[in-house]
Structure formats: structure tokens, C-alpha cells
Image (spheres, rainbow, N blue to C red):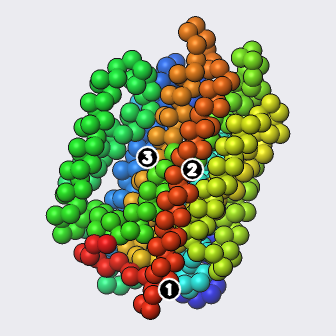
């Protein structure tokens, strides 16, 4: 690719990744507005967020497989067209069911992040592609911090439909950008979608995200919840067997079993639980009214401003990480970033009586999440062929989505357990308990990353270096 074309491609890739992340997160600040304006319960309104995460988790491995084939450009354009159509459904004055359909279509766009990484790795010089992939990974997370305050402000000024109108504008811009800038995939690629594997995985993820979102089930119907959890595990095992036996698997689980990839995905899963747990704790604490004995009673828009340090420092960490990678191995960067996130938990647990302390904790979280997200692709792609970039990273993003959902659920369960009978808000100590649980999650993430670093160091001392993964070969 010519240098001028590469200069245009890089901002396009980053912009598309940022847009799909921001649009998918629009459901978070608008849940209350949806419930009041469309006259549905808060539990029903919560599905405007859950259904986007679900469709994204299901679409991500499918798009990752399609992105590994010869029709990647067409896949990107068609997916963005679906997102634009879904955005239009969220804006039109239609019943609640149509809003959910639109949100599901918007969530499909989350699967494009891995495809953006595949394009970068195929069409940019190796030293340039590594930094761009790291930046794409970062903006896919900090996009929530960009969309949250804007959507909240528009909802306060013009209502929920005006807030969703933001999604329509930016997704249309993303589609135009992709049409102008996305190159065709390299020749010689082929990809087939494992339909059976996609269906079983969709059913398993539906149960997992449903259980993560419906927290009342855990306290009121524990036996039913346990049964559904067992069914979800069984479905995941069935999916694993299907993928092993398939000649064209949705995700090559042999690649996932590679120690570096398996360790990275485990770190992403546990780390995702902790990262999203702290994010939800801080935003919920900031909006708790003074009458609860703590909190700041912030409006949705002002609470969204608390996310600005998260986004800014996350972006800074993402830009700095590629430079640091020349001196520090990616697994050590994962471990260091997990420690930083743990520091955010410690800060929140020890000091949250002043709003500035919440801003500081959110900034520390952004710094850690940005570094973690920027280093993660390097661990996985070091043992992954170029042709499998989209597929390998798509599985990592499914793991991340499940981890985030469980982090939100665990936080809700801990706070619910700390809410006394007849009280609307949990005790202040429940937030400390949740923060300590998050510290535990980040400790596990740190240890997992250090184990990866130790293995990386042993391979680096060998004559042949790390053993790359080949299709059809296990760890």
C-alpha cells in the first residue's frame, strides 16, 4: 500500500472501531430515559444494552471468520449497513420492540473491531501495524467514555430519540468512510462459516449474558439459575467439540489452546471482570443521592463526565504502549497494567468522599485499561498467522464481552447483598467489599500475565524463539 493510502487508512480504521464501540455503549446512559419515555420497566429497558452486547458477542466470531476470507471489504460494508439500519430504527418513533431490534443491529458492529485489526496487519508495514492494532484495541474500549456523556446530554436536551440520533449520524459517517477507504483482502484467502457452531455458540452466549443481566434470578430463583448455568456450560462444551471436529471451524480451538493464546484469553476474561466492575462501581456511586449517606447525586450527564479521565488517560496509555513495547515484553505490560487497575480499586476502596477522588480513580482505571488493551493483541498475534488475525482477535473479544458482563453482574450482586431490608441503596461498605473482590480479580490477572511473561522469557532464550501456531496444530 502506498504511503498516502496508508495515511488515509489508519484514521479510517480507528474511526470505525471508535464508532461501533461508542454506538454499542449508547444503551448505558439511556436506560432510565427509555423506561420513562417508552413506559417499560427498568428491567426491560436494561435489554437495550444487553441485546447489543449479545448480538455483538455472537456476530464477532462469525465476522472474524468472514473477515479471514476474500470478501472482507464486502463484509465490512454490509455490516456497517446493518448498523446504520439499526440506528435508524432507534431514532424512528416506533414501539419498544423495534428499538430492541435496532439495538441488536447496532451491536453487530462490535464484530468489526477484529476486522479492522486484520486490515491493519495485512496492509500496513509490520512496525506500523503493531501500533495501529494496539490503538484500535484501546479505542474499542474508551469508546464508551466518548459516547456516554454525549448521549446523556442529548437525552436531557431532546429526549431519548435525539440521543440515538447521534448513533445514526456517526454510523452513516463510518459507512461512508469504509466505502472510501477499505481495501480488498489479499488474494488466496478462503473462509467458510460453521453454521452449527455459530448456532450453538449463540445459544450458550445468550444464556451467559442473560444470567449476567438478570441479577434477581440469583437471589430469588437460585436453583433455576444454577440449572441454566449448567446448560450454558454444556452448550459451550458441545460447541468446543463441534469446532474440534469441523474442517472449517468458526474458531480454530487448536489455536486457542496454544499456551500464549489461552493465557492471554484467561487474563482478558478475569481482567475484564475486574475492569468493568470498577467502571460500574464508580459511575453508580457518583449518581447515588446524598440521602443514602454517601454519593454525589450527579445527573446522568454530569456522571458521564466522570468518564472523561478514563477515556483521556486510556488513549494516552494506548499511544505510549507501542513505544514501551520495544523495551518491555507484552506479557509484562499486561501484568503491569493489571497492577495499575488494581491501584484504581485500592484508591476507590480507600478514598471516595470527594468527587476529585472519583475522577482520580477513573483516571487510574483508564491508564491501566488502555495499557492492557494495547498490549493484548501483541501477545495473541505473536503466534498467529496474518490470515487468522481477525478470527483470533474476534475470539478474544467474545471473551472480553463475557468478562465485562460478568463484572457488571458480580458488582450488582455484591451491592444487592449489601442493601438492607426496606432500603433502596446499598450500604457504603458494600462498595468496599466489591472493590476488594475486584482487587482479587486483578491479582489473578497479574499472576496469569506473569506466567505468560515467564514462558515468553524462556522461549526468547531459545535458539528458535517462540513457536508460531499453525492451522490444525495444537499447543
Residue 367 rendering spot, x and y as whole percentages: 70, 56
Residue matched to label 2: 442
Q: Earlier in the sequence, mark 3 or mark 1?
A: 3
Residue at 46% across, 52% down: 269
Crowdedness near tag 3: few (<14), some (14–19) or many (≥20) residues, C-alpha within 10 Å: many
Residue 319 location (% of width, % of height): 69, 68
Task: Tell me which label, 2 or 1, sits earlier in the chain.
Answer: 2
Q: Is residue 335 left or right of residue 364?
A: left
Query: Is disc 2 placed on a helix, strand or loop?
Result: helix
Q: Up-down: is 21 above or below 175?
A: above
| Spatial separation of the CA atoms under disc 3 and disc 2 | 16 Å
Q: What element carries label 3?
A: helix
In the picture, which quadrant includes the N terminus?
bottom right
Q: Name the residue under label 1.
A: 461
State the residue at coordinates (68%, 74%). Answer: 324
- Residue found at the far bottom of this picture: 463
- The image quadrant of residue 149 is top right
Taking 77 as reference, is 450 left or right? Answer: right
Which residue carries the number 3 mark? Answer: 402
Distance between mark 2 and mark 1 Cα atoms: 29 Å
Residue 246, given in percent of the width and then of the height, sits at 18, 65
Q: Residue at x 64, y 80 (%)?
A: 326
Amino acid at each position: 500500500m502506498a504511503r498516502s493510502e496508508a495515511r488515509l487508512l489508519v484514521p479510517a480504521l480507528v474511526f470505525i472501531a471508535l464508532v461501533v464501540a461508542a454506538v454499542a455503549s449508547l444503551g448505558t446512559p439511556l436506560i432510565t430515559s427509555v423506561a420513562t419515555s417508552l413506559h417499560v420497566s427498568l428491567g426491560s429497558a436494561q435489554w437495550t444494552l444487553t441485546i447489543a452486547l449479545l448480538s455483538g458477542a455472537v456476530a464477532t466470531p462469525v465476522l472474524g471468520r468472514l473477515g479471514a476470507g476474500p470478501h472482507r471489504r464486502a463484509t465490512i460494508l454490509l455490516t456497517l449497513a446493518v448498523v446504520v439500519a439499526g440506528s435508524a430504527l432507534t431514532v424512528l418513533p416506533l414501539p419498544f420492540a423495534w428499538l430492541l431490534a435496532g439495538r441488536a443491529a447496532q451491536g453487530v458492529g462490535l464484530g468489526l473491531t477484529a476486522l479492522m485489526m486484520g486490515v491493519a496487519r495485512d496492509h500496513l508495514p509490520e512496525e506500523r501495524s503493531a501500533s495501529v492494532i494496539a490503538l484500535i484495541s484501546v479505542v474499542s474500549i474508551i469508546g464508551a467514555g466518548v459516547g456516554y456523556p454525549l448521549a446523556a446530554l442529548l437525552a436531557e436536551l431532546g429526549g431519548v430519540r435525539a440521543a440515538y440520533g447521534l448513533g445514526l449520524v456517526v454510523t452513516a459517517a463510518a459507512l461512508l468512510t469504509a466505502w472510501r477507504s477499505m481495501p480488498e483482502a489479499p488474494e488466496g484467502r478462503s473462509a467458510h462459516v460453521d453454521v452449527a457452531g455459530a448456532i450453538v455458540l449463540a445459544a450458550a452466549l445468550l444464556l451467559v449474558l442473560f444470567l449476567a443481566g438478570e441479577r434477581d434470578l440469583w437471589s430469588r430463583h437460585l436453583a433455576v439459575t444454577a440449572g441454566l448455568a449448567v446448560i450454558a456450560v454444556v452448550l459451550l462444551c458441545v460447541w468446543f467439540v463441534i469446532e474440534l471436529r469441523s474442517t472449517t471451524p468458526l474458531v480454530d480451538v487448536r489455536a486457542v489452546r496454544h499456551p500464549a493464546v489461552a493465557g492471554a484469553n484467561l487474563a482478558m476474561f478475569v481482567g475484564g471482570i475486574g475492569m468493568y466492575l470498577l467502571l460500574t462501581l464508580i459511575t453508580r456511586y457518583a449518581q447515588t443521592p446524598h440521602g443514602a449517606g454517601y454519593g454525589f447525586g450527579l445527573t446522568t450527564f454530569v456522571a458521564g463526565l466522570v468518564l472523561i479521565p478514563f477515556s483521556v488517560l486510556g488513549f494516552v496509555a494506548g499511544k505510549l504502549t507501542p513505544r514501551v513495547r520495544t523495551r518491555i515484553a507484552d506479557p509484562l505490560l499486561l501484568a503491569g497494567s493489571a497492577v495499575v487497575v488494581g491501584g484504581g480499586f485500592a484508591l476507590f476502596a480507600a478514598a471516595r468522599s470527594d468527587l476529585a477522588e472519583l475522577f482520580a480513580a477513573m483516571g487510574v482505571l483508564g491508564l491501566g485499561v488502555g495499557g492492557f488493551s494495547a498490549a493484548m493483541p501483541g501477545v495473541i498475534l505473536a503466534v498467529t498467522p496474518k490470515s487468522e488475525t481477525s478470527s483470533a482477535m474476534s475470539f478474544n473479544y467474545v471473551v472480553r464481552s463475557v468478562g465485562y458482563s460478568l463484572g457488571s453482574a458480580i458488582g450488582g450482586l455484591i451491592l444487592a447483598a449489601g442493601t438492607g431490608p426496606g432500603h433502596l441503596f446499598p450500604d457504603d461498605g458494600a462498595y468496599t467489599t466489591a472493590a476488594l473482590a475486584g482487587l482479587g480479580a486483578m491479582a489473578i490477572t497479574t499472576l496469569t500475565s506473569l506466567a505468560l511473561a515467564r514462558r515468553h522469557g524462556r522461549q526468547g532464550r531459545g535458539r528458535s524463539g517462540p513457536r508460531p501456531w499453525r492451522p490444525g496444530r495444537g499447543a
